[in-house]
Each structure stands twice: as structure tokens, then as C-alpha cells.
Amino acid sequence: MGKTIAEKILERHSLDDKAQIEPGNIVRAWVDLVLLNDANGPVSIRHFQNMGGEAVASPDKLAMVCDHFAPAPNAPGARMLGDMRRFAKEKGIRHFFDAGKGGIEHTLIPEQGLLGPGDLIAGGDSHTGTAGAFGAFGTGMSWAGMAAIMVLDETWFRVPESLRFNLHGAKPAFVTGKDIILKVLQEIGVDGGLYKSIEFGGPAIAAFNIDERMAICNMLVEAGAKTGMVEPDEITAAWAKQYCKRDHVLLKADADARYESRHDIDLSQLRPLVAKPYSPGNVVPVDSVQGVHVDQVYMGNCANGTLTDLRQIASILKGRKIANGTRAIIVPATQQVYLQAIAEGLIEHFVAAGAAVTTPTCGACFGGHNGALDDGEVAVATVNRNFKGRAGHAGSQVYLGNSYVAAAAAVAGEIIDPAKL
């Protein structure tokens, strides 16, 4: 029987040559990268210390990114950032990215070439699965589990069952990678991928660039998935040639790989989708919520603050104004993305339209700072979660959508199909 991509990656990283890489079996494995941010890093550091950890087993495998509370919004946030800085200095961590020197982790790490196709990535953040856009196995783990890897330089996994989504048909205007993952959530629900790997392939996957593939894989955890990835192709290979700093391997599923289920998505039938409050799985066509007034539009996050997203936003905002009674916040995902957006004149369009453009940060995504919502406010956001109270006051509501949908809502002051602009 052939193997899925997840099975091949675990087989490649197994510490036991005789391990049976089959769904349900346990595999001891080494990892290529351990990823911590300032929300989970300080807790993982305390676990590391409580385990008797002294030197980090493989310091060059550890990347630490200040993005959730950076720049520090208050004294407790400053303490968490301080914990990160002290640990990085004491343990000799080269891959440490402070405010103004990096960006949001899941966009920054591949930009820095610190992951590649075929890699096994463990992160303290649940959206570490974004690495699947690059043909890697990325997964969020417990903070104690992250500490154990820093001590032992190994971990264990239960081999996941796999689902396969094949894309075909022509991609319509204003449909992006965000709509693919929202379609998956609409089809299988928020627990349909529980501890599974979700693969994407088929002839139409080539219609989505690396940035849009990040949007697809970023929200796999919202379906409960352990991991997931886009099957590597020429686009993956070209990205790896440009960015990846070490040896890598493009692993494709075998023709006779075993899947729990197979699904098809016909792009020609897809229109922009929106997830209504209070669940990423509460997905409907954008037309069905047209006319809902919007107080705030937030554009950016770990997978939707890419250069592709900023270009999509600019295509809507150029020559237009943010509606009266609506405010817009735009967050480039990394400093490099920010610089390129300046070079292309995108930031000028945003500011001229009346949008606030902020430094790379996760702040507003989780309601921490730089855009938290008040009681009764309604927002459209390109983020990954819209749980009650996630983005600020528990009385606020958040609708999830792609960058075109969000920018159109900012201009109209209400949810609208971007095609109508």
C-alpha cells in the first residue's frame, strides 16, 4: 500500500528504522524546527526549566518570534517579551526575531528560509500547520511538549489518517486560497479533520500561489486537523530554490495511498465565502450576508498579510475611500512584506483611502491590542478565528473572509460581493 505525504514525512524523520508508518501507530521522530512565539514561549520556557533543562539540545533548530505582544501593549506583555529575550540570549538562540526585526511567525519563518519541503515542524502555536503550503508537516503542540523537544531533541506522533481534496476547474475572479479552506470547513465542519492530515492537490492547485496556499493550510486546524499540506509541484520547487537554506525534498503522495475519504472542489462553481459568527465553520456565500453593517475591517494575519493579500486589497482601495462610520486596519505580515508594499506604492493607496497601517503584529487577531473590538461592534477580518470574544469584547461579532471581501466591506461600509464594486 502506498503512502500519503504525511506518512512519508514521518517515515523520513522516524528514529526507528523498523517503525510501521501506518495510521494509529506511534512514531518517535526528530524535527527540523521548533517554533515559539511570545504567547507560548514563556510558558514553554518555564516547563523547560522545570524539566531540569539547561542547554537547548539543538539551539539552531529553535526559532523564537516576538509577534503576539510586540510591540508591548502593557507591562504584562513587556514581561513576556522580556522572558523571550533573556532566554534567547542565555541559550545562544541565533534565530530570534524581535519587534521591528521580523514579523508574524508563520509568514516570517519560510521567508527566512528556515523551513522547506519535506520538513517536520513543531510549534507552540496552533497555526503551525501553515507550513503545509511549502510541502512540510507542521503542527501545533502543547507547551510542555515543546519544552521536551528542547531538552531531548525528539518527540513522538500518532500517525494521522488522511483526507484528500482535489481541485479542478477554472478559478473565478475574487476567489482566493481563503475560500478553499472555508469551503473545506463548510463541507466537513470544525471537527471533520480531527487529528487527521488534509492534503490538497489536483490540476487546479496550480492556480494558487505560495501566499494563497498559506491561507489554505493556516486554517486546517479549524477543522481539527493535526496537519495538512499542498502537494508539492513546480510552484513549490521554485519557492524552495529561491528561499530554502538547506537540503529539502518534494514528497508527493503515492497513487495508491490510502485515504479516509476523497473530495473534489470545482473552482468554477465557487464564489467568495464568509464565515459568520461565532465559528470558522459557519460558512455561507458572501451574498447571503450582504448588507450587514461593518464597524471595523481588519486585513492581515499570519497567512493573510502577505504581499499577494496586500495587492488584492490595493486593487479594491485604489482611488476609493473607507466608508464613513467604518474604520480599516491593514497589517503587513513581515517587515520585508512591508518594505515591498512601500516600494510598490501599496501603502500609499491604503493611507490615501483612510486606512490605518500598522507594524507586523498578531495583536488585533486575538483581541490583544492594535484593533480590539468594543461591545456590539461588527467586523470583517481576514484572520482565522471568529469565536465569541476572540477579537475583543464578547459582545462583538467577526465575519471571516478573503482580502477582496474585506477591502470591499471597508469601502461599502457593509458586507458586499467585491464583484459589485
Image (cartoon, rainbow, N blue to C red):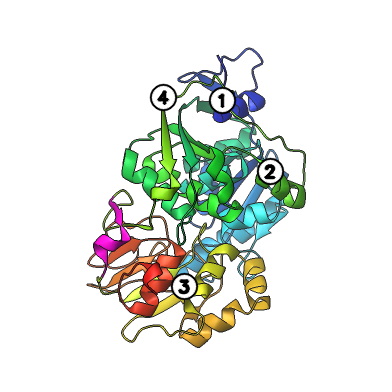
Q: Which mark is residue 338?
A: none
Looking at the image, which is closer to me, 323 or 128? Answer: 323
Image coordinates of residue 27 in percent, x first then y, are 55, 22
Disc 2 residue type?
Glu
In the picture, which quadrant includes the N terminus?
top right
Disc 4 residue type?
Glu
Query: Residue at left 60%, top 40%?
Result: 121
- Write down the residue under mark 4: 260
Magenta region: which residues? 282-290
Query: 10 Å neighbourhood of mark 3: few (<14), some, or many (≥20)?
Result: some
Query: 10 Å neighbourhood of mark 2: few (<14), some, or many (≥20)?
Result: few
In the picture, which quadrant includes the C terminus?
bottom left
Question: Mark 1 or mark 3, which is nearer the start of the sequence?
Answer: 1
Mark 2–mark 4 CB contact (< 8 Å): no
Query: Residue at left 43%, top 49%?
Result: 268
Image coordinates of residue 230 in percent, x first then y, are 56, 40
Image coordinates of residue 259 in percent, x first then y, are 46, 24
Looking at the image, which is closer to me, 266 or 373? Answer: 266
Q: CA distance from mark 2 to mark 4?
A: 27 Å
Disc 3 residue type?
Pro
